[in-house]
Image (tube, grey):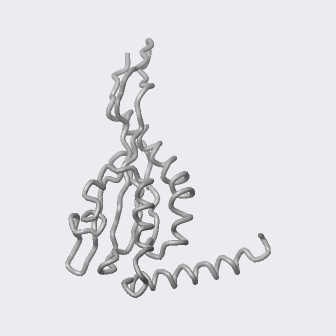
Amino acid sequence: MTDFDLQSVSTHDANVAHIEYFNSEYYLDDFLPNYWKNPFIKEFNHSEGNPEDDDMFAWAGLEFYQPEDGYLCYVDFGTIAKNFREQEINEENVYPYTWDIHHFISDIGVESSDGYHVNNSWIGKKYPNILNMHPEKLINILNELLEIPQVKWPLQVFQNYQKKIDETKELEKKYKGYF
């Protein structure tokens, strides 16, 4: 009988689920519509690497500008397999077939003029329990930034807004006549 390595199999399944969820469903349904509406949101970073190569696999994340100072805040997403309940055993192999896939916010950091800080983010101060929160809630939190009067927006947000306008013009030129 083949040895069953629960950790590597569950990590692989979690990484596959991470790719399927963040690189398509979350990106298309949650991130992309809000990217165009919210100038504080800079970009989405897709997961990278092969699911079976845990050491080289990078989770997805997104970047946004902090409202107070305009520094970039990085939010990383994670996915784990948890609540393992059963396994199927036959003569040759052992197969896990019942566990839950859990997506969460795994890390937040801010890049500023004096380095990278993990505990110095606007979102971490305002929402101290943000780590381990489901990523779908993040978009609603970032949309709260739109309530800030434009006169209080950092320069970086205006520059990002202009970049999105320019990007829209390029897309309109590129796809003119298709729609």
Q: Position of residue 65 (x, y in %)?
A: 37, 74
Reply above or below: 12 against 70. Answer: above
Q: Is residue 157 left or right of residue 172?
A: left
Q: Quadrant of residue 147?
A: bottom left
Residue in the image at 72% along x and 74% along y: 175
Q: Position of residue 17 (x, y in %)?
A: 47, 42
Q: Position of residue 140 (x, y in %)?
A: 44, 61
Reply above or below: 178 against 61. Answer: below
Residue in the image at 28% along x and 73% along y: 111
Which quadrant would the N terminus be assigned to in this image?
Answer: top left
Instruction: Choose between 168 and 126: the one closer to the eye.
Output: 126
Q: How many marks?
A: 0
Reply above or below: 3 against 125. Answer: above
Which quadrant would the C terminus be assigned to in this image?
Answer: bottom right
Instruction: Choose between 164 and 69: the one closer to the eye.
Output: 69
Q: Position of residue 105 (x, y in %)?
A: 35, 53
Instruction: Choose between 23 and 2: the one closer to the eye.
Output: 23
Q: Residue furthest top?
A: 91
Q: Residue furthest right?
A: 177
Reply above or below: 41 against 85. Answer: below
Residue in the image at 40% along x and 62% along y: 141
